[in-house]
Amino acid sequence: MTSTGLPVTTPSRIVSVKPIVLPAPDRGDDLHVRVSAPVAGERLPIIVFAHGFGSDLDGYAPLVDYWSARGFVVIQATHPDSKRLATPLDDPHKPDVWRRRVQDMKRILEELDTVEAAVPGLAGRMDRSRIVAAGHSFGGQTAGILVGLRVTDPRTGTAEDLSDGRVMASVQLATAGKGGDELTPFAHENLPWLRDQDFSHITVPQLVVAGDEDEVGLSTRGPAWTADPYLLSGSTDKSLLTVHGGQHFLGGISGYEVAETTDENPDRVALVQQVTFAYLRHVTGIDSTGWEKTSSALTGEAAHRLGRLESQ
């Protein structure tokens, strides 16, 4: 047990390789990815992770290191909105950035042979039948689209099904809720892909993580907005972790000692690490013991100081 009071698993050594370059002639720039994986183990499940707006493949080490050191292959991309790419403000592709992110993730899934071959010792050890999409903030929407979230394209006014049947579940962290009149004027003007989101087509297992003090400033509803991906989902197998005192970076999940974290708290980070890991082992069929213990600790009669878990 740790300061969270939740069960933990001993980490193992990992290997992390970057950049792995996936040719993308239709993208404008080749797709750069990072892969982190344990040095031992077989039939390793895969997590494709989408970063938040402006981040890159080097972000989210507190989560990536934790998951990969405990049996998962984690693949991260640098998406077109990354500050690292210095995309001009008048870039004509900007309204399509939400769609281009999804295309990045699908390209990764198409190029798993290339990804595997680029990591020493990984050949033959990935289990391609067990793939989970995960993401934070804007990346949570990206992960959601891969499992059925439908976004009305601000250019065409249509909402396509861009889901990918290879993805068996999702983990969405501090991500956007429904659009409509509840969006702030800033969000409505600058983030048109949030104007109309339909969560009802999500039917696979889903874990949503929300901070109860996440005043991200994109909805007039405040922190409650980030619970929408759970409340409005069509999945019959879904869970919501509410992090007490958690703001948008949930204690600091986006990196070690990053300046953007406004609620730096190692215990909150540990909570997110341990709950997501227990869920990942459960949903990929490795072992449900940790998830059962975690669920009991966070849904019992005695309130947990760090968070609460509810499931349907």
Image: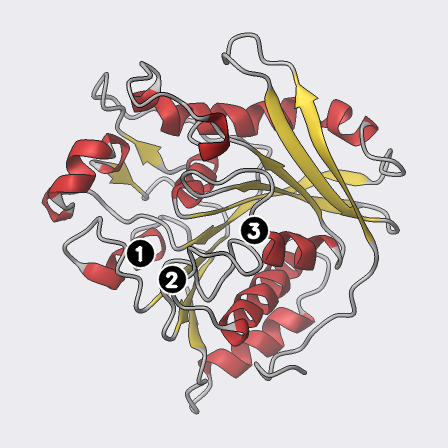
Label 2: state its secondary structure: strand
Give me the C-alpha separation between circle 1 and circle 3: 19 Å
Image position, residue 260 (x, y; %)? 42, 55
Q: What residue type is labelled 3?
A: Tyr
Residue 226 image label: 1
Residue 60 image label: 3
- In the image as oriented, which residue stretches furthest toward the bottom? 302
- In the image as oriented, which residue stretches furthest toward the top? 25
Give me the C-alpha separation between circle 2 and circle 3: 16 Å
Residue 210 image label: 2
Label 1: state its secondary structure: helix
Q: What residue type is labelled 2?
A: Ala
Q: Which of marks 1 and 2 is nearer the N terminus?
A: 2
Residue 231 shows up from this direction: no
Give me the C-alpha separation between circle 1 and circle 2: 6 Å
Q: Residue at the spot x=79%, y=31% of the render? A: 116
Label 3: state its secondary structure: loop
